[in-house]
Amino acid sequence: MLKTNTQWLAPEIMDVIRLFDCEEEHFTHYFYFTDGRNYINCIEYMGEITDFSYTCPTKDDIEYKRYAKRSAKLAFYELLSSAKGKTFPYGALTGIRPTKLAYMETDEGRDFKELFSRMHVDGRNIDFVGKVIEVQRPFYQRKGGQELFISLPFCPTKCRYCSFITAPISATKQYVDPYISCVEREIASLKPILRDVRSVYIGGGTPFAVEPEQLERIYAAVKALNLPDCEYTVEAGRPDVFTDEKLRLSKQYGVNRVCVNPQTFSDETLQKMGRRHTAAQVYEAYAAARKYGFDINIDLIAGLEDETPEDFEHSLRCAIELRPANITVHTLSLKAGAKLKEETRRLHVGGIGRMIALSRELLTAAGYQPYYMYRQKYQAGGHENCGWALPGKACAYNIGVMEEISDNIAVGANAISKRVFAEEGRIERLASPKDLSTYINKCDKIIADRLKLFGED
């Protein structure tokens, strides 16, 4: 266990220690705050003690904690970067939203690039964050409102990298109808709290894994809310569950964006990760969705098992050739609950930096713009996930929820609602149970708690 005199800094420090594949028991940490501006971290590592000083004027307790965490991460990063001879693309920034930190600095009248540089963020990534912010500008000018999320956590099979609560639908079939009944009740309960809904997103799992009549029940419940015309996305998902009937129903009920998520265009990799479809079926699903005029999102993952930069480049070029509205490039990460995490303690992916560089190079050349990004723990090479869109085709839901500039009203198991109190600089969250049977049994309480959270003040 990490020895520190300031225990609330331990989680921040551990993020950096894990980044360098070190063991926490090898460190002793002492933190001091002096003169209202000096953050001093003394670190003992391998028998040597090193002092690090971070200076920043502090006006209140909130700033004190923020700068203390920042100073501790920076101290450990600088120590270990020197000791190991390694750097990472986002330096000592371990948070999942680099853009949010950039906005915070800008709102306080500072140039975020100065902070990012001090935290040893690679210059190319500093510029990249700036590009994302520029594309987001129109969305920030009309921030606020609500995004509606509906969780359908069912899949044909569970992929090796997946940490969601999904299990093969063959094993959870007995829960599907009662689950959908609860979701219908939840959706109907939202009428008193809906104000300025900007988007609807039905996610998974793989929502198209359920039967057409079950999917229609969800669509009918949403329709009964009488929402204004807005972005309406269904994460249809894996091509082996696409049918013309499900696409027709989606169009009939006002869906205007669907996700076709191959993750790779390599049949060999698809088989390794536990999928039961081929790259050819991806093309078939894409053509079927295109026939109905949907905007289409495609997801790819950089760093899948045994793939080389050349393999990933092939998938990128295949996706770009289809010309979808949105291509999201995820970097493989080890997530709790994923089979890959159980089998792999540390994630090392050869050529991951080249894969991310290729995605930026090829997507930019093809006319796509980076419009939202986020990071995860245990992500290969310390890189990011990024959504790329053709001009005018950015997914508003992704920006609103990831940047936390709008309320997220989330329905279903493992759904997390967030109410944003922008003027107070805080967010209140309400998480639904992950387990399907627990969720079903607690549906009434979830409804009551959500009405309380989003009710008028």
Image: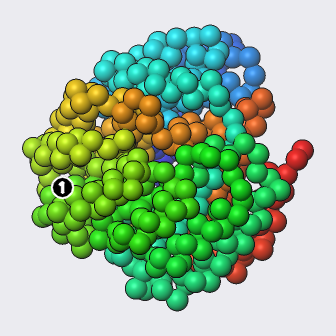
Q: Quadrant of residue 367?
A: top left
Query: Where residue 312 sits: x, y (%)?
Result: 17, 46
The answer, for residue 25, to whether it is visible in the render is: no
Q: Which of 25 and 259 is in front in this view?
A: 259
Point 50% across, 27% down: residue = 136
Q: Which quarter shows the C terminus?
A: top right
Q: Which amino acid does label 1 sit on?
A: Phe
**Which quadrant of the view contains residue 388?**
top left
Q: Which residue is drawn at 28% across and 50% down?
A: 301
Residue under label 1: 265
Q: Which residue is drawn at 38% across and 36% down?
A: 389
Q: On the rendered structure, is 435 left or right of 135?
A: right
Q: What element carries label 1?
A: loop
Image check: 109 left or right of 159?
Answer: right
The residue located at (52%, 62%) in the rendering is 252
In the visual, does 385 lie left or right of 417?
left
**Residue closer to the observer: 419 or 45:** 419
